[in-house]
Amino acid sequence: MDALLEAFFNGISIGAVLLLAALGLAIVFGLMGVINMAHGEFMMLGAYTTSVVQNTFKPLGEPLSGLYIFFALIAAFIVTALLGVVLERGVIRFLYGRPLETLLATWGVSLILQQFVRSISWVMVLNIGLFCFLFFGAQAILSRRPNFERIRGWFVIIMIPLSAAIALIVGNITGSIFQLAVTRPWFGAQNVNVAAPIWLRGRLPLGGYQLPYARLFIIVLTIVCVIGIYWFLNKSAWGLRIRSVTQNRSMSACLGIPTQTVDMLTFAIGSGLAGIAGCAVALLGPVGPNTGQNFIVDTFMVVVVGGVGKLVGSIVAAMTIGMANYIIGSYALKPIVGGIPALDNFFNFFSDPSMAKVLVFILIVTFLQFKPAGMFPQKGRTVDA
Amino acid sequence: MTTQTKELISPVTQPTKRKSYWLEVAIVVGLALIVLLIIPPVLNSMGLGFRVNMLGRFMALAIVALGIDLIWGYTGLLSLGHGIFFALGGYAFAMYLELQLPDDQIPAFFGLYGVTDLPWLWRPFYSLPFTLGAIVLVPSIVAAVLGYLVFRNRIRGVYFAILTQAALIVFFNFFNGQQQLINGTNGLKTDTARIFGEFVSSPQIQSLFYSLTAVFLVLGYVLCRWLTSGRFGRLLVAIRDDESRVRFSGYDPTGFKVMVFAVSAGLAGIAGALYTVQSGIVSPRTMDIAFSIEMVIWVAVGGRATLIGAILGALLVNFAKSFLSEQFPDIWLFFQGALFLVVVTVLPGGIVGWIREDAREQLRQLFRIRPQIATYPSLEEDLDIRHEQQHISHQESDG
């Protein structure tokens, strides 16, 4: 009984992390048909934000500094949501209707973000700031000239290398004057540790099994997020708009819904949720530049299995995949099927976390044979649905 | 009327077509000869022997790029899992090489895990013909099965991309976890193995494989050219542009998609085998997510739906990668990320597509030479259209 309880709660808590990570992805995918490959990196940034917030709260002393987690959640949401807006306005906006290209572009963004957290330092901040100042400043000044459209090609060709060169030179000079004080990377390539607050460090005894409070916190956080998103999508005015654009973009546009704003808002919320997920992941263990990579495929599977456009699909799918991963990986079925040698051998073969994924994938592909559009497909009569 | 115009056109177009065909053959043969006969001695005499090896490896990667171009550029299926097929080909050949041992010995790494009998999976790889077959067929069959299960349900677009990526992770986990079968994370080394009585890493064998790679690249190009030029190629493009319409026209796209996926996987298998012998090792790392997406970007940089572009892109990006990661290891990821963004947003046709489509116009605009008015050439040239125009103007003047 204890073993089953343990399997149940472990499965739930793995599923909760998955759900938290997949929630934002599913909303964005449902609305825009865009898979954000940088979603994992947004989670990673959320985790890094958590660590920064934690360090700023340290001087406050013990009982107060434990509250950092709530501020970290808000900060992570804001940081990643802003970044999501930048990504949507800067790149994805131009790629609507080309989902595969969007996928590649967001992958490019994810690579940049990975290297960005490794090498960000004051000098780099100075470089980027100076470059933006020079380039966009020059653009703002020159764009007042009436013939700007005609010289735009030349402007881009000349100004990009020029501002880049000036920024690099200034950066190098600053670096050689102030030495390590400005050139030392903030985070570096090694992992960042986030310690859970003291009040999250214990374990809740449940019969013979003990559930860590951190896991419990994540489960509660997931529930709060799901309820919040459900409320937002179903009860608020913008949620109504988001749902209508999800169902039929062109008809919504005809009826006066600002689809571009809806896209931006949805992307911001989806990315913000990734930030919150990153905050949760940070509580479970050290976070590195590659942390996001570990989540992408699992969260994508949640979206594929759950189907598009319904929250409940993502919830069921995340819980099922989480459970299946844990139950197969830890061979929790041993008391039930252990007696039959053939089954015993079979499950033993798959009984480690990485082999469990193999079996889960086979199960997913089998599942898609019966339900190609996921558990809760959108009903429609188009050929492409 | 139509038959008449056809007769009018055919004597004009036919010879030019044939001429361009022979021109293409001449260019391909010429380039192949340069790569085979001129580049190695020149580089060797400059003391850059390792660049020859590099070129050989990158040509192997260009073969994968051809396969990806076939399914992505022409058929519109984005596979993020070609690392699977690449690795399967590599493993097949590496297993054969590892087995080139004095009688009754088994590869040394088995000793680490206490395995004394050769697993059954390895036995067929004693024979060279079986291995050569397996290099092509194992990836093709895996792709065909996976493709059939996916395409049968009309799963496509982003879903297909995600599923192939998940399959990649699954294979990665499987190969990583099976130490006792295929040496897990460490992979199989081919450096110290022997083939035809020589070490695989010896210069003779390496130059043999260099030539083989060039030959297979040409063969792969010819195969893809043949597949994409005729009716089959047009069907692939039709599936890419509007699959529903293809289905309504009475074709079943599933079979074509499965086949093209399998062919592309077979090419990746060959490439994997050739790459493995030239780099000396095959390990589950070839099934990294990042590596498989890189393969896609080679094609995107060179130009989708242009075979030359795929080859060019693979060579260019890889040389840029090796150059940049030698000089500035930090910058490579930034550069690669920017490459993805630029190719997708600014250069959707890739280099070759840009040269074919807009290069002339854009350069002219840049240097403020008066732009030519772009129009559809067919309006001036096509006899059918001209006839119709006359017809319409007659009608208008009548009315």
Image (cartoon, coloured by chain):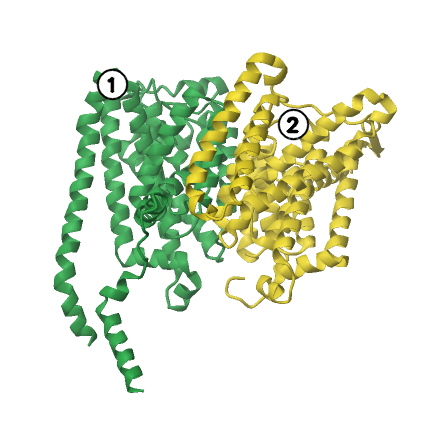
Chain colours: A yellow, B green
Q: What's the chain of the residue with tag 2?
A: A
Corner quadrant of residue A115: top right
Vertical order, A139 against A287 (above or below) = below
Residue B234 image point, x, y percent: 31, 58
According to the picture, the residue beneath numbered tag 2 turns out to be A287
Name the side, left or right, on which A99 lies relative to A154: right
Q: Which residue is mark 1?
A: B203
- The x, y position of residue B115, in whole percent, is 47, 22
Res A225 seen here: yes
SS at mark 2 in the image: loop
Nearest-to-viewer mark from 2 and 1? 2
The residue at the point 39 percent across, 54 percent down is B257
**Residue A341, x across and y down, in percent:** 59, 37
Measure the C-alpha gap from mark 2 to mark 1. Answer: 45 Å
**Any part of residue A337 in sight:** no
Amino acid at pointer 1:
Pro
